[in-house]
Image (cartoon, rainbow, N blue to C red):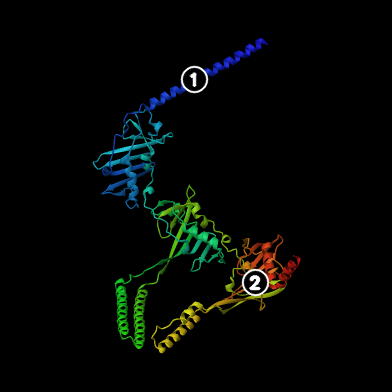
Amino acid sequence: MTAKKKKKGKGLLFAVLILIVLLVLYFVIDLQQKKSDQEAETEETEESSLPVSVTEDEISKVTVKNGDVTMTYVKNDDTWTYEEDPDFPLDESAVNTKMNCLTTLTVDRVLESPEDLSEYGLDKPQQEVTVLKTDGTTFTLYIGNQNSSNNDFYVKVDDGADVYTMPSSSVNAFNMQPYDVAKADSFPTLESTNIRDIKVEKEDGTVEFSSDESGTSWTVKDQDGNEETAGATAASDLTSAVSSLTYKKFIDYKGDDLAQYGLDKPTETVTIVTEETEAETEEEPEAETEEVTEAATETKMVSESGSASETETGSEETTTEAVSETATEEATTEAVSEKETTEAATETESETETETEEPKTIEVTITLLIGNTNDDGDYYVKLADNNGVYTMSESTLDKLLNVDVLDYVSMYLNDVPMTNMKSLEVTYQGETKTLTVESEEAPVETEASTEEETEADTIKISAGALDDAETETESESEAETETETESEQQMRTVYHYLVDGEEVDSTPFRLFYNNLIGLQAQKRTSEAPEVSGDPDFKLVFTKVDGTKLTTEFYLADDGLYDVLSDQNLPARISKMDVQKIISYYEDVINPETETESETETASEE
């Protein structure tokens, strides 16, 4: 037993010794590695700086080599050109921003004469930047790998032995391609409310969306030419998506080889028609307007001055006849003055209206060609009347790439507002009834203003006025009161709701009709279902213009109703929704049922 314990203790001691040896080896190896790194990187210099420098005014030409692409930018009198392609649409501001990075190069560390440049990616540099200065001297920066710890880049200058670490802000600008500094066009700005037509042409056919002049009511035409009313929300989502189209990247300004982008035979062509308004208004002749206004004002002032003089004269004579004459002259003068002022203002307004042209409406058509996708999943696109090739993201084009007509057809089954309904024939349980709405204009009973009448009756001519003047004033007051009473007369429209020519209560009638035109399908189908027998519920709308809309409801085996229409695609709707409509209809044609139920409820209470 004791021997076994001793043997076990020796084994444990041996294991501990092995662990200690391994730990020592680890620390030795780690120390040697750190020493090797220090020897490779050498010591930092006290002052870290590049042996070359350049100012903005000294830059004459910059050549950037990035992989297999070489870009040369020449500066002449502060103007940049692209040497490889002088016609290239260069964005000089973007070029200037990148090249000015050369004037602010900073160094974090200097690694003196490292032996193996491959450790820093400088045996095969990622980028080379050669600068030609105005004095004819040149220097080249070789940009290698990026340090994963601090994101600095390793850089070598010309044939120098030292390696410099530089912040990414100094050298990232030269990880570039030609179109990074191209002057790109923007996709045309579109207002969703101005879009009037969208046509999507694909290999399997064309789908077209069209709106009315106001842009609020839309229709959708499928590949077979069948036209349906589009849902307002779906149409709005589509126009919003189209108005949000934007380019992602500029690819090719020439567009002379469209086959490589799949644009020689586009997978999809989208034609957008918008209406733009241009208001062209001539400047109003302000000077002439002011002269007319001033002339009218002076006329009124002179008239008022004359009236004041005559009034003063009449006062001195102190006769009631003079008072009456003065009052008459004042009224006449003021009437003439007001007439002249009104005529002058009318002439000015008339001249202004004549010189102002009505806004012009311009129809603008934009055709977008959509080609293949690139490695990032973006689509190559171009406008039909522009050579430039760009990319658009899949998410931007989603609404146009996946057009399903059924997603856009309106779900409303009976979109006939009461104002557009001449009659409605309803067939239920073998009986057909006709619903109509008639209207008439009737006066609105209003009480005359007692205060105004009292005030008019109490107006008196001052003491000393003649009886004739008093009589004239009273007759004028009566005439004004009658005119005011006539003008206060208002009219209102009275509606009568009829079933087979007999007037019924408006409340159940309106409740039934409003729910009927608000009825929406659960989904539309492209093919009509097989039905047999008479429909469970049938509607025949006759519109004001004489056109008809027929809607039939058939209960299917699965508990849903199949809906067939002579104007719209087939649809499916829940049984509950149809039964609710039927219930409202029964309240209209059987008003006594509602009355009896109310009586029973009241008696129970």
Residue 242, numbered label: none
Do the residues bearing badges 2 and 1 touch, measured as CB atoms within 8 Å? Answer: no
- Does residue 590 appear in this view? no
Q: Secondary structure at mark 2?
A: helix
Which of the 4 image quarters holds residue 70?
top left
In the foreground, 500 or 53: 500
Is label 2 or label 1 in front?
2
Residue at figure coordinates x 50%, y 62% from the top left: 199
The image shows residue 527 at horizontal and vertical percentages of 63, 63
In the foreground, 148 or 307: 307
Given the image, on which type of amino acid does mark 2 rest?
A: Phe
Residue 101 vertical placement versus 323 (above, below):
above
The image shows residue 479 at horizontal and vertical percentages of 46, 85
Residue at figure coordinates x 40%, y 34% from the top left: 121
Instruction: Locate the C terminus and report the quarter of the image it occupies.
Output: bottom right
Farthest residue toward the top?
A: 3
Residue 109 vertical placement versus 288 (above, below):
above
Q: Which comes sooner in the sequence, label 2 or label 1?
A: 1
Which of the 4 image quarters holds residue 226?
bottom right
Residue at figure coordinates x 38%, y 46% from the top left: 177
The image shows residue 456 at horizontal and vertical percentages of 46, 81
Residue 509, numbered label: 2
Residue 25, numbered label: 1
